[in-house]
Image (tube, grey):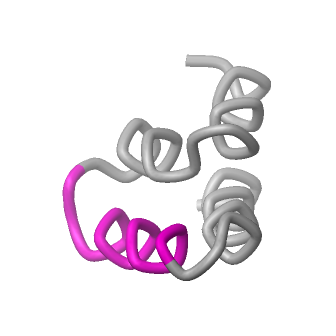
Amino acid sequence: MSDIVRILLAIFLPPIAVLLTRGLGLQFLLNVLLTLLGILPGTVHALWLILRKP
């Protein structure tokens, strides 16, 4: 999946973007929690995970 699609998903649906990038794990659960606290922290976390070099 292209990074552009993941970035768009991170803006609109951050947990889905993290799920597709990292799978079901700690980062996904953390992103769900951050998104529940506010859309901005969840979006920033998702973008950070997508744009970070492995």
Instruction: Give the overall secondary structure of the magenta segment.
Output: helix
Left or right side of 36 for 25: left
State which quadrant residue 1 falls in.
top right
Q: Is residue 34 above or below residue 22?
A: below
Question: Residue at (46%, 44%) from the top-left corner?
Answer: 21
**Residue occupying the far left of the picture:** 24
Question: Residue at (21%, 65%) from the top-left corner?
Answer: 25
Q: Is residue 34 above or below residue 15?
A: below
Query: The magenta stretch spans which residues?
Result: 24-36
Quarter of the figure that contains the C terminus:
bottom right
The x and y percentages for residue 28 are: 34, 63
Q: Nearer the viewer, residue 23 or 39?
A: 39
Question: Residue at (76%, 55%) from the top-left corner?
Answer: 51
Q: How many marks?
A: 0
Left or right side of 4 for 45: left
Left or right side of 53 for 35: left
Q: Is residue 33 magenta?
A: yes
Q: Is residue 38 above or below residue 23?
A: below
The x and y percentages for residue 18 are: 47, 51
Q: Is residue 9 above or below residue 10?
A: above
Q: Is residue 16 magenta?
A: no
Left or right side of 38 for 27: left
The x and y percentages for residue 8 are: 75, 30
Question: Residue at (61%, 68%) from the top-left corner?
Answer: 42
State which quadrant residue 9 falls in.
top right
The x and y percentages for residue 44 are: 75, 69
Q: Nearer the viewer, residue 34 or 1?
A: 34
